[in-house]
Image (cartoon, rainbow, N blue to C red):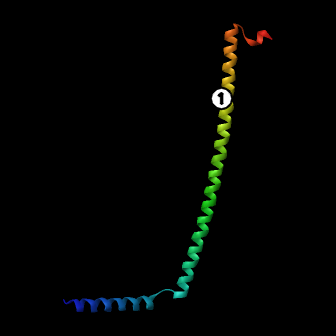
Amino acid sequence: MSDDRKLSYFFLGLGVGIAAGVLFAPKSGEETREILRTKASESADLLKRRSEELRETASEYVDKGRTVLTRQKEQLANAVEAGKQAYRETVAGKPAAEEA
């Protein structure tokens, strides 16, 4: 088949495809553009909602982490103080409660 004939058949097929697409399109161009705009807007709204939810969840985790860290700090401080008290009692040879 010659190149000219192949090119002719290509353009013939392209024309038939365009014509079929226009004839059998379920919506007009304006309706299709409106649907696309609506879907894009819905997607943007969904993205905003999801990012806000993610921000709130992250904030909750940060707050929980701070609470746990504060609690661990307090427990460590209490353990250090108990260790110091035990050391003082051992060095003194008698419990601090008996001294008072």
The C terminus: image quadrant: top right
Q: Residue furthest top?
A: 93
When the figure is inspected, residue 61 is found, relative to residue 72, above or below; the finding is below
Q: Which residue is mark 1?
A: 76
Circle 1 — which element?
helix
The N terminus: image quadrant: bottom left
Q: How many marks?
A: 1
Identify the residue at image location x=70%, y=12%.
Answer: 89
Left or right, 77 with reference to 35: right
Give the image location of residue 4, x and y in percent.
23, 92
Identify the residue at image location x=65%, y=49%.
Answer: 60
Identify the residue at image location x=65%, y=38%.
Answer: 68
Q: Residue furthest left?
A: 1
> In this orientation, which residue lies closer to the viewer: 47 or 86?
86
Left or right, 12 with reference to 57: left
Give the image location of residue 78, x and y in percent.
69, 26
When the figure is inspected, residue 52 is found, relative to residue 13, above or below; the finding is above
Give the image location of residue 94, x and y in percent.
71, 8
Question: Label 1 neighbourhood size at 10 Å, few (<14), some (14-19), many (20+)?
Answer: few
Type of residue at label 1? Leu
Left or right, 17 with reference to 36: left
Quadrant of the image occupied by residue 7: bottom left
Quadrant of the image occupied by residue 54: bottom right
Give the image location of residue 13, x and y in percent.
32, 89
Identify the residue at image location x=65%, y=55%.
Answer: 56
